[in-house]
Structure formats: structure tokens, C-alpha cells
Amino acid sequence: MNKPRTNYINRELSWLEFNHRVLEEALDESVPVLDRLKFLAITASNLDEFFMVRVGGLRMLIAERITRRDPAGMTPARQLEAVCDRVRAMVGDQYTCFNEQLIPRMAEAGIGRLLPEELSRVQLKFVQHIFENEISATVTPMAVDATGPFPLLTGLSLYMAVRLKPAQGKLKPRFALIPLGINASRFVAVPTAEGNHRYILLEDIVSLFVDRLFPGEPVMECVPLRITRNADMSVREDRASDLLAQMEKVLDERKQSDTVRLEVQAGVSRILLSFLQRRLDIGEKETYRIPGPLQLSDFMDLAGLEGHDELRYEAWPPQPSPQVDPTVSMFKVLSEHDVLLYHPYDSFEPIVKLINEAASDPDVLAIKQVLYRTSRNSPIISALKRAAEGGKYITAIVELKARFDEARNIEWARELEQAGVQVIYGVKGYKTHAKVAIVVRREPRGIVRYLHFGTGNYNESTARMYTDVSYMTCDEELGADASSFFNAITGYSQPQKFRKLAAAPIGLREHLLQWIESEAERKRHGQKALIMAKMNSLVDTKIIEALYRASQAGVKVMLNVRGICCLRPGIKGLSENITVVSIVDRFLEHSRIFYFHHGGEQKLFISSADWMPRNLVRRVELMVPVDDQACRRRLRAMLEISLCDKIKGRMLKADGTYVRTKGKGRRKNSRSQEALYRYAQQEIAQAHQRKRTRFEPHRPPQQGA
Amino acid sequence: MSASKSSSSRSSGEDSRRPALPIAVIDIGSTAVRMAVAQVNPDGSLRTLESLCQEVSLGTDSFTKGMIERPSIEECVRALRSFRRVLAEYDIADSKQVRAVATSAVREARNRDAFIDRIYSATGIDVRVIDEAEVSRYTYLSVRPDIEKSAVLRASDTLVIEVGGGSTEVLVVQRGRLVFSYSYRLGSYRMRETLEEYGAADVGLLTAMENRIQRTVGHIRQRASVKDKPNMLALGGDIRFAATHLLPNWEGSDVARLPLRSLSRFTNKLLKLSVDELVHRYHLPYPDAEALGPALLTYVHVARALKLKYILVSASTMREGIQREMVAGDIWTGELEDQIVHSAVELGRRYEYDESHAQHVAKLSCQLFDGMQEEHMLGRRYRLILRIAALLHEIGLFISNRSHHKHSFYLIRNSSLFGLSDHDLLLTALVARYHRRALPKPSHAEFGTLERDDRIAVTKMAAILRVADALDRGHTQRIRTIGVERIDGHAVITANNVAELSLEQLALREKGDMFEYVYGMDVALRGVAAGDGNA
């Protein structure tokens, strides 16, 4: 990677390093083969998004002739160049992994890919049947030539590019494009004599029978291709009054934006490729010749193939939390103590239970919730609908700017509106990223607000794959703050001063800077000081500068940053007291937890925000203090486990590269995700144990209880 | 107010007692419409559930054009509609649970009635325009807990000051007791608006503001008769903003101690910034940004004039004062009544009245009022008005002993008596006016404008006051306790422990005509010698 010319690591290159760490999991022989395939598919879909958003963005900057350097001192052009070099190497690694390791391993394990030439006579007949009955009707070739209109290709979809023999008496080759359709499965199972699972790829079938789509026209060549379009959508919402209508327009616009990448199967002829490059207005630099199947992200489906559990990690099902008795109402549970859950080790069920109970509880007056990337058929959405239909006041902040999920969001947002939910489509100019829900309940003592704060979305399916913290409480001050927060984002009130919360874009960064500075100050005065923080990305230069100052003051700073990290740790005189570890394992690290020693007060926070300008300036985010003693102990233990992972952790070096942490001492074999899972298992087992060893006498019913 | 997390914030959720109801106060000011929703705890204390605030520009309209324009009205309607939704979310439906008030910006607008009607028809919220005296009362109610909590404030003189958009409230509290209250037409917003209207140049603007503030400060010093170094307890959004900035650890649950030097430095810094810069740098709404500099400057000047090094800042708001009154139900009771009487006494002293006589007539008036309850059927509020009128009935003598009742009338009418609304003050002045000479006539300007019920009440009270005054004709306070008996259609006043009553009986014959006219019975005075035990 680049030499430390400045105190910062370029964020694009840092992100690519993250993707590389994911790729390392795919390359890791100790990982079960279907999980390796999954990791590989993730690196591919990550790269797709990277091209659409980041590479697309860089190209726009270059097109606008912007030459301003990033904090790492690189111009957009220089960044693009470095990014492309790194990506080319990475694509090479991906296909080495795929062709040389995963394909043979999977074949050994009984999931073999069949190439057209490997088909037996019976199999060929079967495939032909499939082509004639299922595929041929969905694939329609479009003739294209050097000058006429060129069809608008959908980004990130597979096409077959076909070169036909020149017409009789002519020299010019003729071309056609065949969209492979989004409905057809890419993997077609082929019967085998041995009963193994063999599959053939859709594009292989099409190229096998492509002649039949061009009767009487000899096909010279047929190769898969795919383009990627720039999708950096800055929603210009201030200029349109109806945000919803505008979003639908943006979806259309995205189909028309610039092509930033052309992928085509290696071995494509010069003549076909230059035709494509010319018509797509794309150069050699943006062209990738792929030595294997395109769109590896599709292999996620194959990795999820039913059965074959021996080829996967053992299941770690979410554990019920001993903090929540399933037979007792969440209102009673939370009125007795706060609840802190760490998903996916702890089940997401208590959150669904709270919203469900709230929907049908006659004393609940109102529910307010921010919904950002929720799941299809979400039980939370249906509970909110039910509650609204039952006459409760329900407010849902639906964020339409959740990347790539807009179409899905618009649909269920309309359903909510029809049920009588007051739906607010986000805040103008900001993406609402905070995860918070309030249930307002009338109780004999007056109004009580039950709250849920999270680091992840209200999405039961991602809650099984992402590590996220949930904090549930009925703390009075947090309740007042949460109400203020909703009043601010629904436009009922100007933002009011919070008692405990901190929110972006007003004040969250300042709060963080204060906390960091105050640790540095304490250290300068000879007190003990410590900062521990876990997040997905660390980019914000103001915060990084503050961390450097803290390090210079002698504060120990332990960071767990899964993805992009622009901070250079371990530079003498600058950051030698800072360590950065990144964990890539079976669950996606997603929680944001911050710890400040604060003279022994040990302040702990959870947050929806990464330390990126995007989160701190352009998003509505929350940082929530966890003050309950038991919850703090739990949260701190979890943070510490995440900071010393000797199996899946990688240490960031000053040059921007990562090395595996070396295990030594007591925690030599600590793999944090496994430790956290065992921790959750143990907790519930101990709770059961305590129940069994304690005798509970039947007492006569109490008077007036 | 901010209940920290404690066992009280936990609730069993299984209790079956009647739930305590939340209450809401809406306050339409010159730069913002605000609402506070609070839970009334079983012990009567309050717990704030939500505070909302939306900027409006009523002040600009009202203070420069004299009326509220259409867009500003609709701005208020929009804000109040969203507040309505919040009220609905707490199931606050009963009008008893909501109080909406408007202060100077609405009060001074020519089209205030149209404004109130528009708000009511669009939102169903019934807004009451409150006058200066009510603002003072609420201000006092809001800071009372601050004063009670602090040993220093309890033991010393405290100047309570709130610089609002349209006016500045000043209260002086001596050892927990209110001795002075006044509402000055010196508002931060008004200042900026009018000065800019006159085209004061940038440099001139600051000087003009300072001159303006100085005049008021002089008045405060003179009128409030405060000692050299009282405590200054400041409240209001602008000073809260300054305190939060200068004292980042201040959480608002107690009174903050703000060094004048740092406030002054901060104020100078802010005054150098344009409104746009303020908005941008401090995330302030525009109207607040316009008011901030002049408001802080006022606090600084007042503090300087009082030679203070620190000012105390309270996070209390007028809305909390209103909430307390809603919870207490009736303001005409107990301590607040004492405060009102006390401020009347202060006023009397300023006009060098015969305090013993005044106090005595007031006492006798109350005794008569109580004794005649069956006849006049007036509520407690009128008892207090009568008491105040009795205390002040002769202050007109300060001006002249000719027609002193008329002087008393306008002196009371134009005073600011803490806690009494403008209307109550008018009634008080009229009762005092009619303590002698002409009976009330509809042709008398102020009397004639009253509603019928009020006219009758004034007459009933004045009749009692005349009798009470007659009973202390000699200004000797010999008649201490009296009783009222009704014998054969006569009202017989029995004076205990007094034998010789000819002077008073003569006076009563002179002054009892109104009583007879009002109550339909003549009035006689009878002495009961010591030991008779007659009641």
C-alpha cells in the first residue's frame, strides 16, 4: 500500500483492504467450503457497490476536473489509479480462489459444476429440455450494430454478447445482445447417476443452444458480459416538494447513468470487445476480462443450498436472553430493569415482543419508530399497522434514502399510511440513520415511555447476521430525550437540548471530541485514561486528530474498526498508543460501542453512527449512554472480547495493511464471535440452572397484590 | 424538574388506581410558540414529559407593523396543529388539561381578536392573551422553587429578571417575599426591530441599544429600592443559551452561577456576528438569533448597574409557573394572596398612606365581606380585590386631598400590582374610587364599560368599603372585631369591647346610604361592652 506520506490512509484503499480481509476468509482452508463461497460472493457484491458508489463518485470528480487532495494527499485521479490497480489484483485473487480452490473443493464435496462439454448424453437432453421449455421464452436477442440505436443495458445484470457471421457477401460482422433475465435461476441442477448435486450455469446453457435463437445464422462467438453504472445519487430533495415522487424518479435516473465498468469473460475476441467498448463508451482501463463466471455474488445462492450442513459452520442460533422472561410482559420486565442484548448471539425476539405487546395493549397511547431497511413481511411493520388500525397514534419515520432499498421501502410505507400510520419520509437533506423506538404508555403513576435504542436496523433477518446492540429501558430522561428527538425529526419542534442523548448532525461530533479531549486532559494531569471504541468505519479527520492528540498525551486508545480506517496507528510521536483491530468472521461486525474511562466513571455508549463525516454531518444519528449497572458490565465485557480476537482479528499497521494478530497468553485462542456466542449460551444455561436449584414454594394468593 | 432516574420512574404497570393525567401549557411568544407537557405526580410535583418549540415571527409583525400578518398567523396555526397531535398522543382531550396563553406580541397587535379566532377555528386551541401582571405572577411562580431551594436566595434580596422578546419582567424578592414587580416595554426583539426600523447604523445600533437599556436600568434601580448588591436571578431562553455555552456541565436542574465577565465577553462576541453567522454557528432559529444579542446585553447592563460579579441563571420558564398554577387550581389562596397583599402595601407606602388605617379598614372590610356572604354571594377573588382596594383607598391623598378618591383611582389603575391582572386592577381601582362621594353611574367612563356582573360586584364591594371606612373614621382603630346580624331587615354591626360609638355612628349615617341602596337594608352600629359575649 501507499507509503505514509500524510497522517491518513486513503479511504478507498482502506476499504479495499477490508474487502481483501473478507477475501482472506474465502481463502482460509480452515473455513468450511460453503462459508468460503459465501465470503467470496460477499467480496464480489461489495465490489459491485464500490464501483457504483465510490468509483462512480471518483469518476464524477475527475469529470468535473476537481483536483483537490483527500486527507491522504491524493487527487481523485491518483486515487482512481490506485484503486484500479488494487482492484485488478483483487479480481485476480478472487478467481484464483474460485477456480483453484473452491470449484475443486466443492466438487469433492459433491457440489460440482458441469461444463457444457462434460455433459453426458442424458444430461444434454435434460438441459436441452430446460432450454426449450424454460429459458428460450425468456431470452430475446436484440440486434445491435455499429451505428444504430443501442439498447439501454441494466447495470449489474448478465447479458450474452453474440457475434454472428457477416451476412452473405458482406464483411462486417453482426452483433446481438441477449439479456439473461432476472427471473431465471443462474444455477440449473442437473441429474446425475451418483445422486450428487451437479449444476450448470445459465450462461453455459444459453451458449450451448444459442444457434437456436438465430436460425440459419452461424454464431461465431457468444460470451457473458455485464456493466456497472455510476449510482452516486445525491438526492436533490430541496428542489422537489414531493419526496416520494422524486425517489421514484431517482430510481429511473439510475438506469441511465454512466457506465463505470465493463466485465466480460476472458477469451473474448478483439473484434467483439472493441465493438462493445465503442458502443458503451468505455475504455480499456474500465474493462475487466474475467477468467471465470461473472457476477460471483450470485454464488451466495449456491452457498445457501439446502442441506450440506457439514460444509458449513455449525449453526449458532440466537439465544433467548435470561434478562427477558417470555411469559412476562415486556412492560413489567422493563419496569424492573433495563435490558441489553447483543445480537445475533442474543435473540431479537424481545424487541418484536415489545412492539407486538404495545400494539395490542389498551394503555399504550402511541408508538414512534424509525424504520430503516426493515425486512419484507416484517412482524414489526404488521404490529404497527395493527396498532394504528386499533386507534393508537403511530408515527413511523421511513428513510427512503437507504441505499438500493428504496423500491421496497416505498411499497410498505404506502401500506403503513393506508393503515393510518403517520409516515414521515425522512428529514430533508439528511438520512435518518438512528435506530430508536418509543412506546408511550399510560400507567397509574402517569405516562411511562418504554424505549429501544439500537445500533442496527429493525430487521429480523439481518439481526441474525449482523452483530448489533439493543438497549431497552424506561429511563425517564432518555424518554424525554427520545420524545424530543422525534419532535425534531417530525418537524413538531426545533431541536431541544438533550439531557442524556447526543444526536447528529447537531452536536454528536462535538460530544465525541469532548469525551476524547477530556480523556487526554485527565492523562495530562496524571490520571488513568483509556478509550475503547468499536465501529464499522473511522474516517472523520477531526475525530482522528483528537485521537492523535489523546495518544500523544499518553492515553491508551483501543479501536475495533471493522471496515475503513483512515487513522494510522503506531506512528511514533503521533499514534503509538493507538491500536486498531479489525474482525472479519461469520457474522458482520456492525455494533458501535464507545468507552471512556472518565476518571473511573467508565462512560459507555452505543450508537448508530460511525465516526465518518457522512454519519456525523449528513445523517441523523444517536449516541446513547448506557447507565444501568448490569447492562454496563455486560456491554463492557463484550467490547473487551471484541478487542482481543486472536483468531479472526487483524491488526492495522502504519502503512495501511493488516496482519493477523498473534495469540499469546491467556486469550491465545480467543475468537471473539465464538466467545460471545458461548457467553450468551452460558448465561441462559446458568439462568435455567438457578431456576432448577431454587425451590419455589406455592404460596397462598396474596391480598391486593 | 428533571427527575433523575430513580425508583419513582419505575412503575409496576399492574396498579389499578386512576392514572394521573398529564397537563400541557402552550405559550405564544414573540419569537416562538412553545409547549410543555408535564406529568402531575400524585404529590403534586411536576415531571416534564416534553418541551416543544417552533419559531414564529409574531414579534416582527407586532412591534413594527402593529399587527400580525397573514403568513405569521398561518405559521402559528401550523405549529399549533403539530402540538395538537402531540396532545392527542398523550390523550390530552380535556380543555382543563391544556392552557394556552399569548404574551406581548399578540397583546399589542391590533388584530389580536382575529388572531385568537383564527387559531381557535383552525386548531380548537383557546388562546388567552395575558397581561403584564399575569406574566409577572407566572414568572414568580416559576422561580419560587429556585428561591426556596437556595439558602442564599431565601436569605437575601433577589432581583429576578427575564428579558423577553417584547418586554422585560423584573421582580424583587426580599427574603422570599415579593416586594416589587414591573413589566418594562424593553424587549430584545422589540429593540432590534424598532431600532433597525429607524435605520440606526451598525455602529449606532449598539449605542442606541445601550442607551435604551440604561434608561430602564435606572428605573429599575430607582423603583425597586434594591440594596447595592442583591442577587440577580436571570431567566429566559437567551440567558439559558449563554449559560449552556459558558457552563457546559450545567444541566439546568439547579441555578447556575455565571461570571459576569465571561457573559460580557460572550455577549460582545455575539454582537459582532451577523444574524446569519449566529444561525449558522450556533444552530439557532432566525428569530432567536435576532433577539440573542440585545437580550444578553440587557442582562449584562443590569448586572453591571447592580455592581455584580456573578449572575444566577435559572432554567425555569413561565410555562412551569402556569403549570404550577394549573396544579394548585386556585391562585386566590394562601401564599400567593399574601404576596399580592404585600405588593399592595409596598405601593401604599410609596404614596405615604396611613398604613394603620389602611390595614384596619382592610381587615374590617374582610370581616364584613365574610359576614355578608349570604347577601353578596361573591367569591374569594372579590374578597381579595376588596382587601386590596381597602388598603389603597386613600393613596390619592398623596396627590391632593381634594377628590382624593379620584386620585386613588388612577394611581391604582396605572400601577403594576403583582399578581393582579389588568382587569382585576381596574375593579380594585373602581372599588377604591367609590369609597366616598358619588355612587357608581353607568355614565362614569370606566365603570360603564364593565360587564353587568362586574358592575354589580364593584357596587357591592364599594358599599362594604364605605361602611368599613366609616367604622375607622377617627383613624384610631378602636373597633377591632365586628359581627354582622340581620334583625328585622336591618343589618346590625356589633362592635366588641367598645362602648362609645357616636363618631362612628355619625359617619355610618353619612356613608351607609350606598349599603342600603345595594343590599336593601339599612345599617346600624351597636357596641357591646366587654364581657357581654355578644356575637
Image (cartoon, helix red, strand yellow):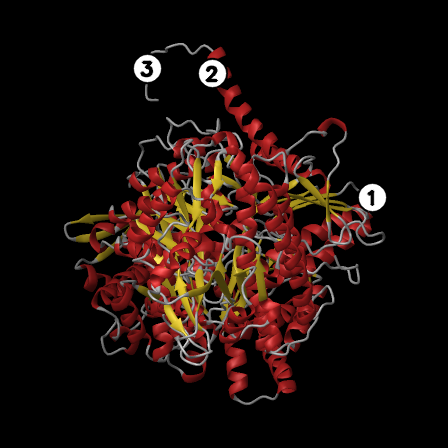
Residue wearing tag 2:
A691
Expressed as whole percent of the image width and height from the top left, the position of residue A699 reads 37, 11
Q: Which mark is residue A526?
A: 1
Q: Nearer the viewer, mark 2 or mark 1?
A: 2
Circle 3: is it few (<14), some (14-19), or many (20+) Cα within 10 Å?
A: few
Q: Residues within 10 Å of mark 2 (few under 14, many from 20)?
A: few
Task: Give x and y (percent) for residue A203.
Answer: 43, 54
| Amino acid on which disc 3 is placed | Pro
Q: Visible in this render: residue B91?
A: no
The front one of B230 and B211 is B211
Image point 66% across, 77% down: which residue? B272
Residue farthest along the front direction in this orientation: A169
Quadrant of the rendered image containing residue B206:
bottom right
Residue type pointed to by label 2: Lys
Q: Residue at x 39, y 47 (%)?
A: A375
Please name the amino acid that badge 1 sits on.
Answer: Gly
Residue B193 horizontal/vertical position (percent): 51, 81
Q: Residue at x 26, y 56 (%)?
A: A418
Q: Which residue is mark 3?
A: A701
